Image (cartoon, helix red, strand yellow):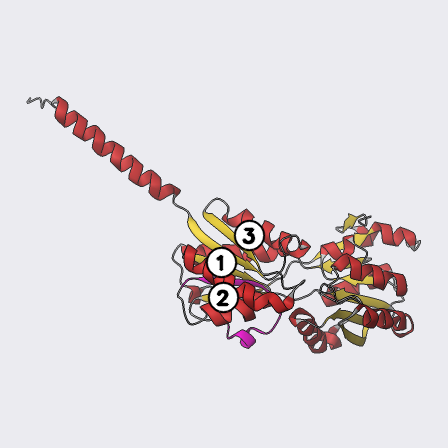
Amino acid sequence: MVKLKMGVGMKNCFRFLLLTLFIVFSGAASAKFKVLVVMSYEEDNPWVKEIREGIDSVLKESSEITYFYMNTKANHGGGPAKAEEAHALYQRLQPQGVITVDDDAQSMFLLPFLKDKVTTPIMFSGVNAAPEKYGFPTANISGVLERAHVRESLAFVKQLLPNVQTACFITNNVPAGLALRNQVQEEKDTYPAMVGAFHLAKSKAELGAIAKKLNTDCDTLFIDSLEGIVDDQGKSLNNIGVLKIISALYKGPILGGNRYQVEQGAWAAVIKTGQEQGETSAEMLLKAMRGTPVSKIPMVTNSKGQRIINVTALEAHAITPRPIVLRGATLVRQTP
């Protein structure tokens, strides 16, 4: 048998080769995708926090995520300038993937700066308008369409209060509000209560007049997308400020489209969650960044509905739900 002797020089070369391979493969294994997330609203918006939580839960291990906030709820007129900033950030980062959240990010940022101009995989979420409005999907754009659980919420409130017969609606005159109006118009024949007036409010004064009148017009009130209604000085009100105005004037049960609205004063709801939409859009983007063609990743609609009850509100109105109604529901106390 012939024994091969390895000299010191060869041993060092061999060790160097092993070390080089280790570094190369370790770097490849640890390399992360660069992802840009453009949010329509401000960073401390409750809905934005839910979306971010969902995105982070999916992408935090595989990606370096950069968030950009357009702040269009508080300053809608400043949206185009913010979109330009987001585009400059995109050009600097050169991300492997993009997520655009809510309608303003689509109309102000995605359409003018990225659509039909880049091949980067892009997933949207929180889109209320019909996808055809934005020309979705495309070869590199897909995502999550948002729909409110109106039918389920009305069925839920009738379990709490069987005498409810007519439902009215208030929302802001924004894309999400207009989309909700279209949804209600399309679905109303399937609802367990009659649909009354649908109001698109713009100002505090208009909101107050509407809320007061609805006491005689409807048995329950569904609210959503209220942020951005302006006060007497033209300053945008947040959701809790708008809810306080409505609650002081409308004395019937109030339903909300989101958890934070129930926590801030609405009585109950079957809510959509930002976590679901954030997770879903992030999962779709990760699949695309790992090689699946976006054309093979179809658009989806949020589907999970969570029943939630504001115990503080029910106690204040001496309402005791039957045990079967409480089964599976999330009970919350109203934010002081």
Residue in front for this viewpoint, 278 or 199: 199
Which residue carries the number 2 mark?
142
Circles 2 and 1, Cβ within 8 Å, touching? The answer is yes
Tell me which label, 3 or 2, sits earlier in the chain: 3
How far across and how far down the image is residue 234, in percent? 75, 67
Give residue 197's quadrant in the image: bottom right
Asked if residue 136 is among those painted magenta in the image, a careful observer would answer yes
Amino acid at dot 3:
Ile
Which residue carries the number 3 mark?
55
The residue positioned 66% from the left and 56% from the top of the image is: 47
Determine if residue 41 is in view.
yes
Q: Which mark is residue 284?
A: 1
In this rendering, position of residue 276 left or right of residue 27: right
In this rendering, position of residue 219 left or right of residue 77: right
Residue in front for this viewpoint, 23 or 304: 23
Residues in magenta?
Answer: 120-137
